[in-house]
Image: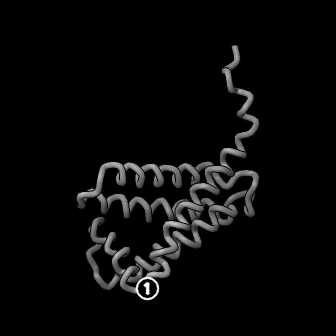
Amino acid sequence: MKAPLSFLSKFDFVGVFALRVGLGAIVAVQGFAPFIGGAKTWKDVGRGLANVGLDQPNLFLVFGLISVMLQVFGGFCIVVGLFTRLTALMLSVVVAIHTAGLFNTDAPLLHILIGAQITLAFFSLLLIGPGRFSLDRRGV
């Protein structure tokens, strides 16, 4: 006996496309405000390094800038399917560091779970690849 919705498996590429576009757009939009926020905002974002044992204040500005640039431009790359695997790897690390920082605050459990889900989605995208509708069909 066939599973009730097994016929949908021939459309799996549409699922990858939806995951890629949705996840990339969410991260790009979320990272835009800190991106235009300037050096003070970048330094605040970069303080997440302290949560993983890298308490070097001179690195906060650099990591913060890299983080917000990766969110905006990496999110766009995920949406269009360009350098998908590499970008998904980098974004999963950035989101994991941010989520680890939430454990040391009074952030609601929901925020921690959302960060964990986004990290898992990027890691899954790293393993799945860009899918059929992408600029780098073979993956990078």
- Which quarter of the rendering shows the N terminus? top right
- Left or right, 82 with respect to 27, comes to right
Q: Is residue 119 left or right of residue 49?
A: right
Q: Residue at x 51, y 52 (%)?
A: 123
For this view, does 16 lie left or right of residue 88? right
Percent x, y of residue 29: 54, 67
Residue at x-position 67% and y-position 55%: 130
- 90 to 64, vertically: above or below: above
Query: Hey, which quadrant is residue 87 in on the image?
Result: bottom right
Q: Residue 8 appears at what percent x and percent y?
A: 72, 32
Q: Is residue 37 left or right of residue 134?
A: left
In this view, the residue in front, 86 or 19, is 19
Q: In this picture, is 66 found above or below 39?
A: above
Q: Quadrant of residue 14?
A: top right
Q: Looking at the image, which is closer to me, 92 or 99?
A: 99
Numbered marks: total = 1
Name the residue located 45 percent from the left edge and 49 percent from the top edge.
117
Residue denoted by label 1: 38
Which residue shows up at 36% across the image and 75% down it?
Answer: 46
Residue 88 locus on image (x, y percent): 55, 60
